[in-house]
Image (spheres, grey):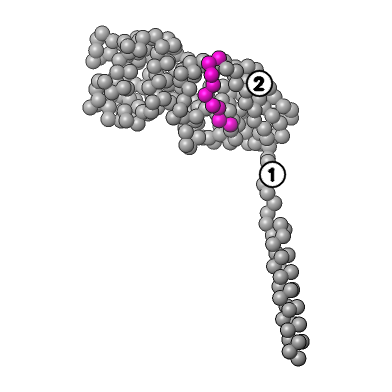
Amino acid sequence: MKNSIIHKISFFLVAMAITITGCDSGDVYPEDNKDEGADIDVTLRFKLTNVEAFPTNYKIVFGSFNDDISYPISSKMISAPADDEEISVSLNNIPDNATYLALYLVQEHSNSKLYPFYTYPIVGELTEDIELPLQTIDLAVFGRVQKQVFSQCLQCHGGSGFAAAGLYLTDDKSYSALVNVTAKNNAEKKLVAPSNILNSYLLDVLEGHVLQNQHSSLSSLKDDDIVLIEQWIKSGAKDE
């Protein structure tokens, strides 16, 4: 009788072990997500000018984007190149909801879009690998200055219709309000003097040399912002 009970208990334990082992098979878990999108490679080759303005507080990425999404859908980060170095970067498995590819300046942590250096629209379905034409990208263009730097100033300079000191830094007015305009607080300087950073009063303000009490928000500016303004001015302060 005792042997019979032991036999039944042993049989029960073996059966339980088999059941538990069976539940541990892959069948009870969902399969790994597979890559979705076009199974192709898109390669961009480019050279950068004004490399001194390559960001350290922001990022440059080559990625796939959608107009309705504020960050890259997929992307690869670009590292700072050597002078005159040709960079080649490839993306694969382009997501189905991507509407364009771009070389984009984005926020360091959130990846929020700031400024597109180059865009390539996706028209129809991608069916084969693409190698985009070699691009020359200027890092110190006015469009980047506007989105990266002046967008931080709009609370006081035109974003709500009010412009401190009459200086509008909105997209449609900032260039004409700055370049070759005499500074109100220093008649010997221009707000922005093309190719002349020493004669550009805007830099005096942004670097905190003047009007500090009127610009408490300057502490939010990053080193990249000042360097970008300098490089833009050195390059002629063009409206590009």
Q: Position of residue 20 (x, y in %)?
A: 69, 67
Residue linked to disc 2: 132
In the displayed structure, does residue 35 sit left or right of residue 186? right
Residue 171 shows up from this direction: no
All told, the count of numbered labels is 2
Residue at horizontal 71 percent and vertical 65 percent from the top: 21
Residue linked to disc 1: 34
Examine the rendered structure and indicate whether residue 55 appears above or below residue 19.
Answer: above
In the displayed structure, does residue 47 sit left or right of residue 227? right
Dot 1 crowding, Cα within 10 Å, few <14, some 14–19, many 20+: few
Task: Looking at the picture, tell me which residue is in the foreground, 237 or 239.
Answer: 237
Residue at horizontal 27 percent and vertical 27 percent from the top: 215
Magenta stretch, residue numbers: 76-84
Dot 2 crowding, Cα within 10 Å, few <14, some 14–19, many 20+: few
Sequence order check, earlier mark of 2 and 1: 1
Residue at horizontal 68 percent and vertical 41 percent from the top: 35
Say which amino acid is labelled 1: Lys
Q: Position of residue 145 (x, y in %)?
A: 43, 21
